[in-house]
C-alpha cells in the first residue's frame, strides 16, 4: 500500500556507547556502501538502535525477520554478510552469537513443528494482542477493506476471490467466489452475511483459536463479503462453549465501530455494515447452514431441504451468504497479495493453506497450518513429532463425525479436498485425531455413531432411527454379542442412511462406520468371530490372562490393580484372579510388555 | 413393555414452585427482548442465569411476555443442550467425551465418576452435590482428557486421580 | 473516538509497527503470554500474574507485558514469548510460576535467555513473506 516497498531485511546495528567504541559506525558505513554497490539499498536497510547490553561482544548486529544475531562484526565482514546473507540467504556461521559451553536455542524455522508451517490464516498468532485493534492494523489489518472500498467494485472483489480458487473451509469445499456471486445476483433486500463459528466437530478448535486470537480478521472478511454481495448486516454464530471467543469478538466489534470500520459510512466511502454476535445454545446440528439460520431466528435448529439455497432464501427468507471463520480469515491476505499469489500455493484443485487441529496420540498437539497437498505423513510425523510412548501409528480420523479414518498404509495421501474424499474421509473443518495401536476401531466407530445419535435433530427418519439401530448393533459387537452377517448389515444400513438423509449431518453420519469397515474389517471380524478385541479396549472381549512368555515379572500390574485381583510375588509370573477382577483395564494400561490379553 | 414399566417405576418428580415475587424478576428480561421473537435463545439464557434452570412457570411467563406460543418455547428449551428444566447440583461436572479425550481414555474416567457419585450422564446426585454432563469437545484438546468442575479445568487427567479431585468439591 | 479515514489507517499502521519492532529505546523488553482457552486452562493466568507482580516489584518501566491468542502448540502450554530489543524473540514452553520468575530474573532483567525452558528463537514464516 505504501509508495515505497518495505525493505525485506533489516540490519539492527547497535549504536550504544560500547558498540560505537568497538566500531559500529564504521560498520554501518561499510554495510551501506556494500548494499548500494549491489543495488540492494531498497531491499535491506541498516537501522541504528540503542544499547542492548551485550557490549562485550560488540559490535552487535541483528537481522530481521530471520532472527539471526551476529556479534563482533567488523567493517571488513560487510561484503561477506551482504553476499551470503542478503543475496544467498545463508547465515554466516563464524559471526553467529554463541553462548559459552551450551548448545544454542534453535531457530523457529529449524523446529519441525513451526518450521514446516506456512501461516496465512494464523498470520497474526502470538504476535498481536487480540484485544487491540491498533495491533491488528499494524499487521496490515483493515488495509484490504480500505483497498476494496477505494479501488474495487463488488464485481471486482468477487472476481478476485473466484480467481484465487478459495474454497469453503468449513468442510463442504464450495468455491467461495461462486457463493458470493450467486448471492449478489438476487435483488431482494436486505441481504445478510453470516459467519459460521459453530465449530462442533469434536477435536477441532481452529476457528476458536482464530476468533480468540485474531477476531478482527474475521470481521474484516465479513465486511468485505458484505460489500461484495450487497449486505449491510452480518451475524457471527458462535457456539456456547466458547465464552472467550465471544468476549473478544464483542470487544473487536465495539472497537471497530469506534474507529468507523463498522457501522455507517465506513472509511467515509458510503458503505454501511454492522455485525452482531449470536451465541449458540449447544446443538451440533446448528453447524449445518439452514439449521444455523433457524437458530438465529430463535427456533429449533433443524435443517430444511435445499433448494432453495441460502443464497436465495436464507435468514428470514432473504438472500444470505454463509462462510466459515477460517474462510473469512483468508480474505484479507487474498485482497492484499492478489489472487495469483494465493493460487500459487496448494494443489490444482485446492488452493491456499488449511489449518488443522492435530490431536490424539501425537507428540505435538496443536494448531497447524500447511499448504494444501501436504501429506498426512508430514503432518503427523514431521510437524506432529510422531507417536509418543513408542507406540505405532494406526489411523488418523479426519473430518470429525462426518469424516472417516485413514489407515497407516495410506499415510502418504496428500491433504486436499479430492484426495481425502477418494480415501473415504473428508477435509471437514480440519480436525485430525491421531490413533495408535491402543485404539479399537470398532469402539471408535461406536463412539461416533453414539455422538450422532445424541446430536441428530430427529427430523428425518434415516438419521433418527437408522443411527439408533446402528448403535445397537455396534454395541452388541463390542460387548461380545456380535453375529455373522452384522458387518454386511451395517454396510447396507449405513449406505441407506448416507443416501436418504436430509442434511449434511445425516448424509455423512455413517461414514466413520463405513470407513472403519473398509480399512479395519479384520478388527470387526475378530470381535465377532473370535470374541476378542485386538486393541484390548472392549472389556467384554478381553480374557484378562497373563501370557507367561511375555511377563517380565515386574509387578507393575500388581501394584496398580485397584481391586487386588492380581496374584504376584517377586520373580514370579503374575496371575489374575478373575473372581475379583472388575475388568477395569488398569493392568493392561500399566503393563509395559503387552503381556496381558 | 419393559420401557413402560421403567417409566412407571420412576420417582415422581418434585414440582418446584417459583414464588411470584421471584417470577416478577423476569419482567426485566421480557422488557429487554420484547417485540423481538428471534431473541428467544438469548432471553432463555438470561432467564437460566437468573434461576439456575428453566422451570415450566418461567417458560410460560417468558412465552406470554414475548408473545411466543409456550409450545415453541418448550420446543427450543428441549432442543438445545445448554438449557435444563431441572435444577442442577452444586457442582456441575462436565467431562469431555470429544474424540481427542475419548482416544486418551476419558471413558475410564466416566466409569469411575458413575461408580463413585452414583449418577449417570444427565443426572443430579440426590444430595444435590453433583450434576454430571458429558460434553463434546471443550476445545482444550492439548490437555486431553479434560474435565470441567464448575469453572475449574482439570487437564491431563489420570483416572487414578479422579476420586481425589472429586473430594475437593463438597 | 473519531471515525477514521483510509489515510488514518496507514498512519496507525506506521505508528504501531514501529512500536512492535521495539527499536525506539522506550521499551527494552516485550513479554507476550499466550492466552487462548487452552493456555488459560493450563495456567497462563498464573504466569501472567507472576510477570505482572515482578514488574511492579522491580518498578521497571521499560517492559511491555501483553497477551496474545493461542501460539498453536497446545501440548506445550502455557507458553510465553520474550523479546529483547534487537534480539530475536524467544518462545518458552511448559511454564509455571517458578519458571516464569526465573525467566524474568535471568532473561528479562539479566539479558540471558533461559535455555532450559526455551523452545526456539525467531518468528514464524508467513506465506506472504
Image: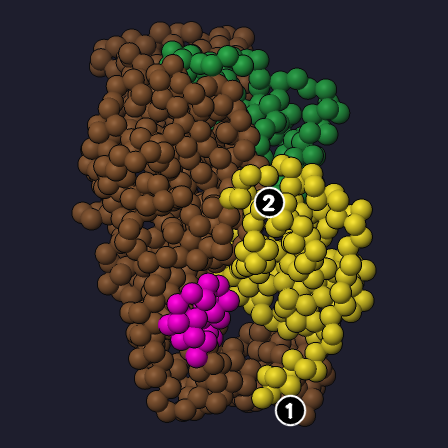
Chain colours: A brown, B yellow, C green
Coordinates of residue A152 in the picture (x, y in percent):
25, 22
Q: Identify the image quadrant of residue A86.
A: top left
> Which residue occupies 61% across, 27% down?
C65
The segment highlighted magenta reads A442-469
Q: Identify the image quadrant of residue A45.
A: top left
Is there one chain holding both mark 1 and mark 2? Answer: no
Above/below status of A109 relative to B60:
above
- The residue labelled by disc 1 is A578
Coordinates of residue A433 in the picture (x, y in percent):
43, 60
Above/below status of A481 relative to A558:
below
Coordinates of residue C90 in the picture (x, y in percent):
52, 33
- Pick whichever, B130 or A88, lies toward us: B130
- Magenta stretch prevailing secondary structure: helix
Coordinates of residue A104 in the picture (x, y in percent):
48, 37
> Which residue occupies 51% across, 85% down?
A479
- Pick whichever, C73 or A296, lies toward us: A296
Q: Is residue A149 visible?
A: yes
Q: Is residue B64 magenta?
A: no
A442 vs A250, left or right, is left
Nearest-to-viewer mark from 1 and 2: 2
Above/below status of A57 relative to A433:
above
B153 vs A186, left or right, is right
- The residue labelled by disc 2 is B66
Amino acid at each position: 500500500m505504501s509508495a515505497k516497498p518495505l525493505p525485506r531485511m533489516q540490519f539492527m546495528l547497535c549504536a550504544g556507547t560500547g558498540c560505537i567504541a568497538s566500531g559500529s559506525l564504521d560498520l554501518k558505513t561499510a554495510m551501506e556502501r556494500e548494499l548500494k554497490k549491489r543495488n540492494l539499498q531498497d531491499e535491506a536497510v541498516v537501522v541504528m538502535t540503542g544499547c542492548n547490553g551485550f557490549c562485550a561482544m560488540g559490535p552487535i548486529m541483528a537481522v530481521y525477520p530471520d532472527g539471526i544475531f551476529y556479534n563482533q562484526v567488523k567493517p571488513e565482514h560487510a561484503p561477506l554478510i551482504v553476499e551470503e546473507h542478503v543475496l544467498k540467504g545463508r547465515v554466516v556461521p563464524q559471526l553467529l552469537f554463541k553462548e559459552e559451553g551450551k548448545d544454542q536455542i534453535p531457530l523457529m524455522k529449524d523446529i519441525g513443528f513451526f518450521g514446516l508451517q506456512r501461516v496465512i490464516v494464523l498470520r497474526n498468532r502470538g504476535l498481536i494482542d487480540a484485544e487491540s485493534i491498533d495491533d491488528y492494523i499494524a499487521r496490515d489489518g483493515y488495509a484490504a477493506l480500505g483497498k476494496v472500498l477505494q479501488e474495487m467494485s463488488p464485481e471486482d472483489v468477487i472476481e478476485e476471490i473466484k480467481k484465487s480458487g478459495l474454497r469453503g473451509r468449513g468442510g463442504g469445499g464450495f468455491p467461495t467466489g461462486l457463493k458470493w456471486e450467486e448471492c449478489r445476483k438476487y435483488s431482494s433486500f436486505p441481504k445478510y452475511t453470516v459467519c459460521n463459528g459453530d465449530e462442533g466437530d469434536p477435536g477441532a478448535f481452529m476457528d476458536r483459536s482464530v476468533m480468540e486470537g485474531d477476531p478482527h480478521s474475521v470481521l474484516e472478511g465479513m465486511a468485505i463479503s458484505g460489500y461484495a454481495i450487497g449486505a449491510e448486516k452480518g451475524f457471527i454464530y458462535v457456539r456456547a462453549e466458547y465464552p472467550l471467543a465471544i468476549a473478544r469478538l464483542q470487544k473487536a466489534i465495539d472497537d471497530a465501530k469506534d474507529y468507523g470500520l463498522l457501522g455507517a459510512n465506513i472509511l467515509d466511502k458510503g458503505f454501511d455494515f454492522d455485525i452482531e454476535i449470536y451465541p449458540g445454545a449447544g446443538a451440533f446440528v446448528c453447524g449445518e447452514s439452514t439449521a444455523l439460520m433457524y437458530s438465529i431466528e430463535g427456533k429449533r435448529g433443524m435443517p430444511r431441504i435445499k433448494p432453495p439455497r441460502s443464497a436465495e432464501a436464507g435468514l428470514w427468507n432473504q438472500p444470505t451468504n454463509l462462510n466459515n471463520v477460517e474462510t473469512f480469515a483468508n480474505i484479507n491476505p487474498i485482497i492484499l497479495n492478489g489472487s495469483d499469489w494465493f493460487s500459487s500455493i496448494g494443489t490444482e484443485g485446492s488452493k491456499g493453506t488449511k489449518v488443522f487441529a492435530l490431536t490424539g496420540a501425537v507428540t505435538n498437539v496443536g494448531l497447524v497450518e500447511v499448504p494444501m497437498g501436504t501429506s498426512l505423513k508430514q503432518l503427523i510425523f514431521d510437524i506432529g513429532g510422531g507417536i509418543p510412548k513408542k507406540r505405532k501409528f494406526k489411523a488418523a480420523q479426519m473430518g470429525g463425525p462426518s469424516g472417516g479414518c485413514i489407515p497407516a498404509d495410506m499415510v502418504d495421501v496428500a491433504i486436499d479436498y479430492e484426495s481425502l474424499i477418494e480415501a473415504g474421509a473428508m477435509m471437514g473443518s480440519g480436525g485430525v485425531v491421531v490413533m495408535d495401536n491402543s485404539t479399537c476401531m470398532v469402539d471408535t466407530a461406536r463412539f461416533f455413531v453414539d455422538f450422532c445419535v445424541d446430536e441428530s435433530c430427529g427430523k428425518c427418519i434415516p438419521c433418527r432411527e437408522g443411527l439408533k439401530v446402528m448403535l445397537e448393533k455396534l454395541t452388541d459387537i463390542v460387548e461380545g454379542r456380535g453375529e455373522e452377517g452384522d458387518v454386511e448389515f451395517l454396510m447396507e444400513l449405513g449406505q441407506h442412511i448416507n443416501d436418504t438423509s436430509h442434511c449434511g449431518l445425516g448424509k455423512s453420519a455413517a461414514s466413520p462406520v463405513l470407513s472403519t469397515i473398509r480399512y479395519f474389517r479384520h478388527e470387526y471380524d475378530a470381535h465377532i468371530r473370535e470374541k476378542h478385541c485386538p486393541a484390548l479396549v472392549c472389556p467384554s472381549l478381553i480374557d484378562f490372562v497373563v501370557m507367561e512368555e511375555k511377563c517380565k515379572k515386574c509387578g507393575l500390574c500388581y501394584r496398580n490393580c485397584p481391586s487386588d485381583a492380581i496374584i504376584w510375588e517377586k520373580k514370579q509370573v503374575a496371575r489374575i484372579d478373575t473372581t475379583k477382577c472388575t475388568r477395569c483395564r488398569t493392568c493392561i494400561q500399566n503393563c509395559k510388555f503387552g503381556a496381558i490379553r | 413393555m419393559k420401557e413402560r414399566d421403567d417409566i412407571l417405576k420412576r420417582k415422581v418428580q418434585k414440582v418446584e414452585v417459583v414464588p411470584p415475587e421471584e417470577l416478577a424478576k423476569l419482567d426485566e428480561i421480557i422488557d429487554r427482548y420484547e417485540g423481538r421473537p428471534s431473541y428467544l435463545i438469548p432471553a432463555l439464557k438470561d432467564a437460566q442465569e437468573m434461576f439456575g434452570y428453566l422451570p415450566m412457570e418461567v417458560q410460560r411467563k417468558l412465552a406470554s411476555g414475548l408473545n411466543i406460543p409456550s409450545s415453541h418455547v418448550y420446543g427450543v428449551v428441549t432442543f438445545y443442550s445448554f438449557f435444563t428444566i431441572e435444577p442442577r447440583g452444586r457442582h456441575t461436572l462436565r467431562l469431555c467425551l470429544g474424540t481427542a479425550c475419548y482416544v486418551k481414555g476419558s471413558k475410564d474416567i466416566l466409569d469411575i465418576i458413575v461408580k463413585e457419585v452414583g449418577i449417570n450422564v444427565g443426572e443430579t446426585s440426590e444430595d444435590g452435590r453433583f450434576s454430571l454432563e458429558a460434553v463434546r469437545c471443550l476445545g482444550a484438546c492439548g490437555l486431553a482428557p479434560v474435565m470441567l468442575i464448575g469453572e475449574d479445568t482439570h487437564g491431563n487427567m489420570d483416572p487414578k486421580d479422579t476420586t481425589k479431585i472429586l473430594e475437593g468439591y463438597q | 473516538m473519531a471515525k477514521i479515514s483510509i489515510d488514518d489507517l496507514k498512519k496507525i499502521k506506521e505508528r504501531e509497527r514501529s512500536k512492535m519492532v521495539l527499536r525506539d529505546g522506550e521499551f527494552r523488553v516485550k513479554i507476550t503470554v499466550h492466552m487462548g482457552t487452552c493456555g488459560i486452562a493450563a495456567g497462563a493466568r498464573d504466569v501472567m500474574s507472576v510477570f505482572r507482580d515482578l514488574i511492579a516489584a522491580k518498578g521497571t518501566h521499560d517492559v511491555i507485558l501483553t497477551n496474545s491468542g493461542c501460539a498453536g502448540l497446545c501440548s506445550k502450554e502455557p507458553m510465553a514469548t520474550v523479546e529483547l530489543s534487537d534480539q530475536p524473540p524467544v518462545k518458552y514452553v511448559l511454564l509455571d510460576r517458578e519458571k516464569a520468575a526465573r525467566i524474568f530474573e535471568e532473561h528479562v532483567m539479566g539479558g540471558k535467555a533461559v535455555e532450559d525452558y526455551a523452545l526456539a528463537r525467531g518468528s514464524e514464516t508467513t506465506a506472504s513473506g
